[in-house]
Amino acid sequence: MSSPAVIAVVDYGAGNLRSVAKALLRSGLDARVTADPAEVMAADGVVLPGVGAFADAASRLRESGLETAVKQSIEAGRPYLGLCLGVQLLFDESDEHGVTPGFQLLRGRVERFPKFEVDGSPLRVPHIGWNEVRFSGSHPMIDRLPERETYYFVHSYRAMPADESIVVGRADYAGEFAVAVAKGNIFAVQFHPEKSQAAGKRLLDAFSGWVETTR
């Protein structure tokens, strides 16, 4: 019997890393929280979770060498799973606290939810709570997921992909927006699987199955 796939949970000094790692362990993966670029490069797959400000995260990842390690892992064909900020950082830039460049692996930018009124009241930002996600398209992750599933969200900013073909999951919050993107060995979501109970477990199980096919 082969050993579980090793997953590097990228530690850049912020976020709910331990809960993400525990959730991955429950899906049969050897999840290791690490701030060592060499460990990221050596892993079978990478998970970049995230909470907090885009600019702070981008700065820490660059200064530590973790951004380069994540990019090299992706270039080497290893599965990447981005969670919340981990999807936003893939794009060209974010306008959170001024314009900050991202990894620039996907074209598009990250913007705050627009000012909007619902039944005469301002749209609540951040978007917090459960929301239905509708998946579509073809990808090893999508092939393993239900067409509709409900997940837990906490965010004020959202990715605006320039290429609609990479959008594989959408939800509604004062209009439809992208909540899951996929391109090659990249799969990333705006919601939090580790906070999404059974639905989140199914997504991480799908990730585990995908990683196994690439070893």
Image (cartoon, rainbow, N blue to C red):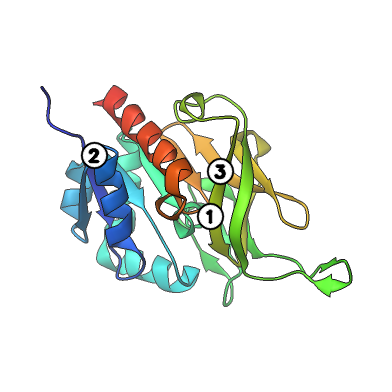
Helix, strand or loop at label 3? It is strand
Whole-percent x, y for residue 51 in the image? 44, 66
Q: Residue furthest front?
A: 198
Q: Which mark is residue 152?
A: 1
Q: Amino acid at mark 1?
A: Tyr
Q: Amino acid at mark 2?
A: Leu
Q: Residues within 10 Å of mark 3 (few under 14, many from 20)?
A: many
Q: Could you say which is closer to the camera, residue 68 or residue 149?
A: 149
Task: Give the number of the mark in front: 3 or 1.
Answer: 1
Mark 2 / mark 3, whichever is N-terminal: 2
Which residue bears the numbered disc 3?
180
Give me the C-alpha separation between circle 2 and circle 3: 22 Å
Q: Could you say which is closer to the camera, residue 43 or residue 66?
A: 43
Whole-percent x, y for residue 65 in the image? 26, 61
Whole-percent x, y for residue 169 in the image? 60, 39
Which residue bears the numbered disc 2?
29
Q: Amino acid at mark 3?
A: Ala
What residue is drawn where x is 50% and y is 30%?
145
Q: Residue furthest bottom?
A: 97
Q: Could you say which is closer to the camera, residue 200 or residue 8?
A: 200
Give me the C-alpha separation between circle 1 and circle 2: 22 Å
Q: Could you say which is closer to the camera, residue 115 or residue 56?
A: 115
Whole-percent x, y for residue 96 in the image? 58, 72
Mark 1 / mark 2, whichever is N-terminal: 2
Helix, strand or loop at label 1? It is strand
